[in-house]
Amino acid sequence: MSAEPVLIAGQWRPSENTGTFQAAAPATAESLEPLYPISSWADCEAALDSARDAFLEMRVMPGEKIATFLEAYAAKIEERAEALVDLAHLETALPKTPRLADAELPRTTGQLRQAAAAARSGSWRHPVIDTAAGIRSCYGPIGPVLVFGPNNFPFAFGSASGGDFAAAVAAGNPVIAKANSSHPGTTKLFAEAARLAAVETGMPAGIVQLIYRTSHPIGEQLVADERIGATGYTGSRKAGLALKRAADAAGKPIYLELSSVNPVVYLPHALEEKGDALAEEFTGSCLMGAGQFCTNPGLVLLIEGEASSRFLADVTQRFEGAAVGTLLSRSVEKALHESHRVLQKAGAEVLCGTGPGSGAGHSVANTLFHVSGEAFLRDPATLQTEAFGNTSLVVTASSLEQVAAILEELEGNLTGSIYSATTGADDDAYDLLAPILRQKTGRLLNDKMPTGVAVSPAMNHGGPYPATGHPGFTAVGIPAAMTRFAMLQSYDNVRPHRLPAILRDDYTGPAQRLLDGTWS
């Protein structure tokens, strides 16, 4: 059986590969046809050359033309919605509805259209004009972008369809997509649609290219190549940090989303006020999608007391009675069991779970751990081990002050939540804890679970290390996500007709500009 072709320089062509692999159906653990290639450096070299050529066109391309491509691509996705949903369901076991068809696919096309609007407007370029000094600046495209997609969002974070892709292209960069090995067929369908949209809108051949897998050394060589402008990566901490070392050594920007336990603090009066409802909400959030969300609430902080004891007993019972979901792959199942072993070795008590799950295919029992605040503080690093899946660790502190001490020990996270009473009875406690948690998280929530990530201009899907590689950027939210794939370009004493249109005195477009200190 021959391997599927790669998309390079606008053509689907046989790969010069070093081997092949197959995706697997998580619900049955059976291998799926067809074979996909593990690309050699020859494939990468050809893709890099084509991306460089495409960038020469795109770096001077009007935003209107880029927007037209993104909108055409969104329409092509909608035309193929049924095929995309069917194949993604087979490759990931994520439910067709409401997850894939009703939530993730509309979010994906919505992101592309938001990116198109930003490209057309140009406001993301943040034009600044200082007429007295004769200096003008704006953001411009950085160069070809390499995108590594994750396993858990085949559409909205996919390497050829998701937020990184949309932001990179909208900023004027071609994309080399490295498919996730869990859903290569789904990614290929997206790349096919993108290629058709590119042809119809007259875009350069190398605007979207696709490879499926490489060796780790070749992946590191890719992110460090001189032709790459930047890399977007979502995945495991170990693999991401290896890529970061290679990119850093070459001076290449790389934006990482790695791991997060997303702490949730329940203050005492909030539990007294509505403990049953909070237990139900937490259980639903933690176990949704078998816990395979980067914002899954993996660490819960309580303060000793009757309300906390009732809450913990209620959540344990709910975990035991809830349906067990299917995990994305054998490797996810294996990694989750390993995380359980690490937590237990560090002293976490098993309240329920850790064994084989009753779900279809790859599954692990819904798992809840417990540890005292004192024990957590003895080994905070190990007890923050991310358990990617249907698992959470509950820490019961002896006092509010101990909760504050625990928060001080936390690594960086994508999110942090604090639940407090509506009566104001917890306000003093909130005022103590919130400033600590604020510095540990990209997004601070009140009285809300963190699993929902709205595609909003105000969203921050980022955070301090190791949640991401840099706390100043977000992977979700246009236009903020676009600046990761841009460079600040200053023009000093450049003649007016040589300036980008957005910096000229006769500019009449829609972008907001900072003109001598005043937005206009």
Image: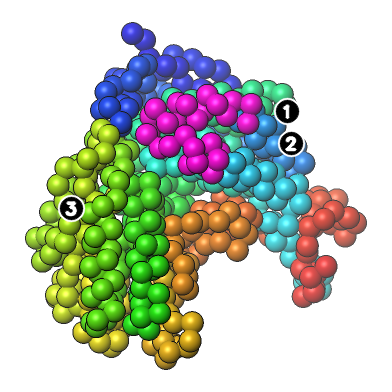
Task: Please tell me whether mark 2 or mark 3 is closer to you in this view.
Answer: 3
Tag 2 or tag 1, which sits nearer the N-term? Answer: 2
Q: Is residue 284 above or below residue 217?
A: below
Under tag 3, what secondary structure? loop
Q: Which residue is mark 3?
A: 353
- Please state if 431 lies on the left or on the right of 63 as rendered: left
Tag 1 or tag 3, which sits nearer the N-term? Answer: 1
Say which of 271 and 463 sits in front: 271
Q: Which residue is mark 2?
A: 68
Identity, as a three-letter code, of the amino acid under mark 3:
Gly
Dominant secondary structure (helix, strand or loop) of the stretch shown in magenta: helix
Q: Quadrant location of the C terminus? A: bottom right
Mark 1 and 2 residues: CB-CB less than 8 Å, in contact? yes
Indicate the quadrant where residue 182 lies: top left
In reply to whether residue 95 is colored magenta, the answer given is yes
Under tag 1, what secondary structure? loop
Colour mapping: rainbow
